[in-house]
């Protein structure tokens, strides 16, 4: 097909959107103002959700998560740790909530089993002895950068151009139809014409639409912050057995432990602060699950802003974690779609549905094929698109050695080194 499609944003949603659009036959270009997955998609807690966290109050998201969990476990197993997840009741009230959790999981099709408290404590000895009830769900840990690099490799092999360090400064509209983008790369500005633009800029969506004088869908920018501890206190993902709240997830990530998360609405995704009071509150909650956290050094705090679909309440905890693909033709601006909401877990389905929507607009059929991400790096090298095969080959040589853990990250870096700014890839 001759239609030119632009994707704004190099997070997991943008990458999957570009991959599926290129797969559908469109001439696809992705633009990221910095490096790929350098914002929200690389600043979360590192989980592929089972959906259980949302099973009581957000069935749509729960079903999306468990469906994607199963798909990703088949096509991207090398990027996932089969750590499983456990919901822990530390109070009688939380133990009672477990019945609602089990019911919600059944309704969403999420495996959820009651576990023996004593056996669990012998498996996870650092968990508080105040534990009253425990339930197991199929949460996973994802190596987010490596996984995203595999998606980027697939997008390139499908024919998508990926331009990093190339900022979209304005969406150009003429007579209420979007016609292209204004770009800034290497201190040079340019304009490029496109037949349709997919705005997947995440929390920066609102700012970009405002600068472009285009009405924005209602978005709730929600700040989430994570605490990283120097040491691994659990081998499983731990969740509090209650409605989603602050400081109720602990994720084992490599040799570290990640505690998350707070949720507060911010006005500007580029300008925010994390209050020490919120950090202290999270630490207190995390210590209730795993007292050892209180004795471990806090390495760092990192944050990101999530573009939640607003429910009008102003409460980020009540907003759904599902997604929306907003067609701006509703406001008289054809040729522009804005993607909001979603999670890293659901990046694939969002990208697929975005491509499906574009195909509907242009009246073409779409039969999506899931990428085999476990083999993406090798196929990318063999395709001849990898600019620095030495990095890849050096990483490959670590297979079977004491340092085999460096294999996949090294391959991922080789892929990421094969993209550049718009002037070099156009």
Image: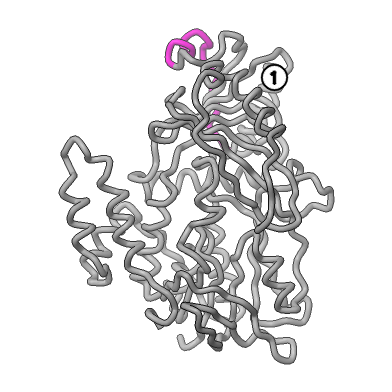
171 relative to 115, above or below: below
Residue placed under numbered mark 1 in the picture: 94
Give left or right: position of 91 versus 135: right
Q: Nearer the viewer, residue 332 or 250?
A: 250
Q: Which residues are magenta?
A: 109-123
69 relative to 4, above or below: above
Q: Is residue 298 visible?
A: yes
Residue 226 in picture, x, y percent from top left: 58, 38
Q: Residue at x 50, y 79 (%)?
A: 187
Q: Residue at x 50, y 72 (%)?
A: 31
Secondary-structure class at tag 1: helix
Q: Residues within 10 Å of mark 1 (few under 14, many from 20)?
A: some
Q: Nearer the viewer, residue 148 or 304?
A: 304
Q: Quadrant of the C terminus?
A: bottom left
Residue 216 in picture, x, y percent from top left: 75, 69
Magenta stretch containing residue 261, yes or no?
no
Residue 183 in picture, x, y percent from top left: 55, 80
């Amino acid at each position: 097909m001759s239609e030119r499609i632009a994707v704004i944003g190099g997070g997991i949603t943008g990458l999957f959107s570009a991959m599926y659009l290129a797969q559908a036959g469109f001439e696809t270009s992705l633009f990221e103002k910095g490096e790929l997955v350098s914002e929200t998609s690389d600043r979360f807690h590192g989980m592929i959700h089972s959906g259980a966290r949302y099973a009581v109050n957000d069935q749509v998201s729960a079903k999306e998560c468990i469906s994607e969990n199963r798909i990703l476990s088949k096509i991207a197993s090398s990027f996932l740790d089969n750590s499983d997840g456990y919901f822990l009741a530390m109070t009688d009230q939380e133990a009672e909530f477990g019945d609602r959790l089990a019911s919600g999981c059944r309704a969403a099709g999420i495996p959820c089993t009651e576990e023996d408290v004593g056996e669990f404590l012998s498996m996870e000895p650092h968990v508080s002895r105040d534990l009253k009830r425990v339930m197991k769900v199929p949460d996973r840990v994802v190596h987010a950068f490596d996984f995203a690099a595999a998606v980027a490799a697939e997008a390139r092999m499908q024919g998508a151009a990926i331009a990093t360090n190339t900022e979209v400064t304005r969406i150009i509209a003429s007579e209420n139809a979007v016609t292209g983008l204004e770009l800034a790369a290497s201190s040079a500005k340019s304009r490029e014409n496109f037949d349709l633009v997919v705005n997947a800029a995440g929390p920066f969506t609102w700012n970009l639409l405002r600068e472009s004088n285009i009405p924005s869908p209602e978005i709730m920018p929600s700040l989430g912050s994570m605490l990283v501890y120097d040491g691994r206190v659990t081998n499983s993902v731990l969740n509090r057995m209650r409605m989603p709240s602050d400081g109720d997830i602990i994720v084992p990530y490599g040799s570290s432990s990640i505690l998350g998360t707070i949720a507060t609405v911010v006005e500007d995704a580029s300008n925010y602060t994390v209050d020490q009071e919120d950090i202290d509150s999270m630490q207190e909650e995390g210590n209730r699950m795993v007292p050892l956290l209180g004795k471990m050094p806090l390495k760092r705090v990192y944050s990101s802003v999530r573009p939640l679909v607003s429910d009008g309440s102003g409460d980020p905890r009540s907003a759904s974690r599902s997604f929306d693909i907003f067609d701006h033709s509703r406001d008289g601006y054809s040729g522009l779609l804005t993607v909001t909401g979603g999670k890293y877990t659901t990046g694939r389905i969002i990208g697929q549905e975005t491509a499906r929507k574009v195909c509907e607009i242009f009246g073409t059929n779409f039969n999506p094929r899931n990428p085999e991400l476990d083999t993406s790096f090798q196929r990318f090298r063999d395709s001849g698109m990898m600019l620095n095969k030495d990095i890849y080959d050096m990483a490959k040589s670590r297979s079977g050695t004491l340092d085999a853990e460096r294999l996949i990250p090294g391959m991922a870096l080789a892929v990421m080194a094969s993209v550049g700014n718009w002037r070099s890839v156009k």
